[in-house]
Image: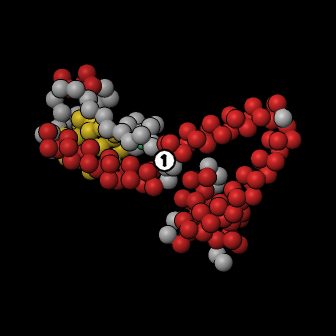
Amino acid sequence: MTLVTIEFPDIPEHKGFAAPVLPNGELAPTASAFTRTFVGYQATCSCGWTDRRRHPATPEGAKEAEYRWASVHATALLAAAPPSELVIKSNLLCERVVKLAGERPLAALTLLSQIESWQRTLLDQAVAGARQGGASWSEVGEAMGISKQAAHERFRATAEL
Ligand SMILES: [Zn+2]
């Protein structure tokens, strides 16, 4: 029996799997623990997330646990994960602008001003769209890597127009 992990390209740091539950209620920490008796499966993620629901110690139970990882944990993460191909393009653009700034700083300045002008507008629109779609300030902050309070203070005015 091998430990099967499931993952989506847009959230590469999350690998889900059906963790065997040992008789004492703890989750088997490694695949080698499969040789021991286990009493069920629980959905678990490489990030440390663990589902509370326990599934039967059968191949079907393992499939149910994997499905729980995808439907409960991964779905929420995917909602806030940009498509990986856009992340790659964004990183590439950043690298190119860094190079340009070293070679022709005035050209980099012109380009960065252009980016700033559409980036600000799009950021306001994205926050307003997320709020209208039911996202909390906490979710908005998390998506941006800032606190709930910082997100609320910064966008309160524009998001509630
Ligand atoms: Zn995770």
Q: Is residue 121 left or right of residue 82?
A: right
Circle 1 SS class: loop
Q: Residue at x 66, y 40 (%)?
A: 93
Q: Residue at x 69, y 63 (%)?
A: 121
Q: Is residue 26 left or right of residue 57?
A: right
Query: Is residue 157 positioned above or below 147 on the image?
Result: below
Residue 106's spot in the image, x, y percent? 87, 41
Q: Residue at x 75, y 31 (%)?
A: 99
Q: Residue at x 48, y 47 (%)?
A: 83
| Residue 26 shows in the view | no
* Pick the front one: 155 or 119: 119
Q: Is residue 118 left or right of residue 144?
A: right
Colouring used for the render: secondary structure
Residue 132's spot in the image, x, y percent? 53, 72
Query: Is residue 14 positioned above or below 110 on the image?
Result: above
Please state the total of marks drawn on the protein image.
Answer: 1
Residue picked out by circle 1: 83
Q: Quadrant of the C terminus?
A: bottom right
Q: Is residue 73 left or right of residue 150?
A: left
| Residue 113 shows in the view | yes
Residue 46's spot in the image, x, y percent? 40, 36
* Pick the front one: 3 or 26: 3
* Pick the front one: 105 or 129: 105
Quarter holding ligand 1:
top left
Q: Quadrant of the N terminus?
A: top left
- Find out if the beta carbon at label 1 lies less than 8 Å from the nearest ligand 1 atom: no
Residue 30's spot in the image, x, y percent? 31, 26
Q: Residues within 10 Å of mark 1 (few under 14, many from 20)?
A: few
Instruction: Check disc 1 and give the amino acid type.
Output: Pro
